[in-house]
Amino acid sequence: MSSPLLDVWEAAAASPYQPTVGKGSQFTVGFLLLLVAFLLAGVFSLNRSFINVSVIGIPASLAFGFGAVYMICAVGVYV
Amino acid sequence: MRSLTSVISCLAALSSYAAAELNLSQPLLSKQVLSTTFTPPQVFKNANLVRTTNLDKGFPRETINVIIENIDAKPQSEYYLPFESSLISRVGGFEVKDKKAPEKGPFNVEVVGFDTSSPTEFYLIHLPTALAPKEQQTLSISYSVLSALTPVPAQIAQSDKQYVQFTFSAYTPSAYLTEKQKSKVKFPNADVPDYTTLPAEVNADKKADPQKQGSTFSYGPYNNIPAGAEQLVSVRYEFTKPITHASLLERDVEVSHWGGNLATEERYWLSNQGASLKNHFSRVEWQKTSYMNPPTSALKQLNLPLAPGALDPYFTDDIGNVSTSRFRPGVRESSLELKPRYPIFGGWKYTFRVGWDSNLSDHLRKLSTGESYVLKVPFLEGPRNPEGIQYARVTLRVVLPEGAKNVKYSTSVPIIDSQTSLHQTFMDTIGRTSLTLTAINLSDDFRDRDLIVTYDYPWTAGFRKPIVFTLGTFAVFATWWVVGSLDNSIGKKKTV
């Protein structure tokens, strides 16, 4: 039986969805990003200044945000 | 004058409200309600009808092949099939096709009922093209009847054979005159100790009724049976297999773009509708016989064939992990073999959940028209056992990523309800868009049906989760700096 949505599915046969980071490397990526966030937080703790809030805080926050997403996927809670 | 009209209309509205009594025996099902005086217009006749009842599985599967003829002067496109109202709530998988052109797909059907409790309700079949006067068309109507088998005797010993009884009408129920008809009953084996015999005068060939051919019985042929005629007959046959019935199946399919994963979880509320045990369950007897693997009325094992690429399966129940399961990944099909914690005898119940992951790339494709995706998943997976499994109600929930919108779906499974809502779980801020579909009276014959969902998912919505975490962490850094630069020393302020 043919339906419009089935045709849509068939038409998109050439472009299956591929995630940016595959299942095999989620743990590595997540762990590295969290490690970077941890180390940057350590550097920040040694030298807390207004300029460091943005210079170190922003990359550390980004590393923690993405690292947390990949780590929770790596442990089996696929968000 | 105007006030009188309004009073009358109010009274009419009130009376209809009082008469609209809820029929709670009927499950949630959209249907057309007709007035009590309705009878299907006699515009068709059944020129020839053959009904086949297949009793191989734990629920009868009926196939009616009928040649219908328009005997009216105008083209007609509405064909009615009557059912008793107690039966129609257990009829599932009702599909009508053109026997000569099955590739054209199933016809539109709907349930029509009456505004009062009536013994008869109808399935209304819409023929895609109206049938011209004196024209004929061959319909192939198929459906299954759930919870239709009664174990007789109702109690058996642990290793006894199980016999079940099935009652049906030898005349196929019809809203029209049937010129010629026959009912075939296919049993799973030739052990049929009891069956109703009908007098030879009723039979068109003046032969003994039913005619037996191995494990197939034929009632009929009968000539010129009027509309609505019934001739109840019962058959009792050996069926030493579990009659597996799921009163509810909840199935969740969760899409994760970040993880590239499709997580499936199924929660079953199973029961065995077979004969209950006469005595206490004997573990010794069970263990003694289990090596010989004889046929039994107990449900011992469930085999779930999964799509290739299934990963990380789990099988738990109310107590916790059930270790008696085996997972065999394969190239063409992965197989999950589940052994319940105890054999499920007649009248016993078992509730459990199974789940597994699979790669999203096998199920999700990106459309060329921007940020839209199309998802294809099976509507129903679940066990494939030779005796079959019946589902009284299936609730399928497709959990899409947070921020997905413009959700559309299509499936060939008859759906009674669909709704889109928000489902909140890990790392969510607003909640994930979820599509919930409900179907009733399904059987494992629907295993190969797909559900296709399309949705729009802008890339900005995809970054919601990491950005929320980033902002949260940045707030921690900022607070850290603010709190750390507060001077909370005791004594005089130092001046540098």
Image (cartoon, coloured by chain):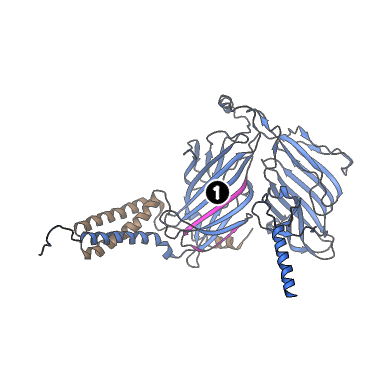
In the rendered image, residue A60 lying in the magenta stretch gets the answer: no
Instruction: Give percent across and percent down for residue B336.
Output: 52, 41
* Of residues A15 and B427, the one drawn nearer to the viewer in this rendering: B427
Name which quarter of the figure residue B452 lies in.
Answer: bottom right
Q: In the rendered view, would you say B404 is above or below B206?
A: below
Instruction: Give percent across and percent down for residue B181.
Output: 82, 48
**Is residue A7 visible to us here?**
yes
* Of residues B308 and B43, the one drawn nearer to the viewer in this rendering: B43
In the rendered image, residue B410 lying in the magenta stretch gets the answer: yes
Q: In the rendered view, would you say B339 is above or below B291?
A: below
Q: Is residue A67 left or right of residue B142?
A: left
Instruction: Give percent across and percent down for residue B89.
Output: 69, 49
Image quarter (top left, top right, bottom left or bottom right) of the C terminus of chain B: bottom left
What is the total number of numbered labels drawn onto the structure image? 1
Q: Amino acid at mark 1?
A: Glu
Principal SS element in the magenta part? strand
The magenta segment: B388-413
Chain B, colour shown: blue
Q: Is residue B244 left or right of residue B201?
A: left
Residue tagged 1: B250
Name which quarter of the figure residue B377 lies in.
Answer: bottom right
Query: Which residue: 58% across, 55% down?
Result: B437
* Of residues A65 and B330, the one drawn nearer to the viewer in this rendering: A65
* Of residues B307 and A47, the one drawn nearer to the viewer in this rendering: A47
Neighbourhood count class around disc 1 (C-alpha, 10 Å): few under 14, some 14–19, many 20 upward: some
Chain identity for the colour brown used in the image: A
Name which quarter of the figure residue B468 lies in.
Answer: bottom left
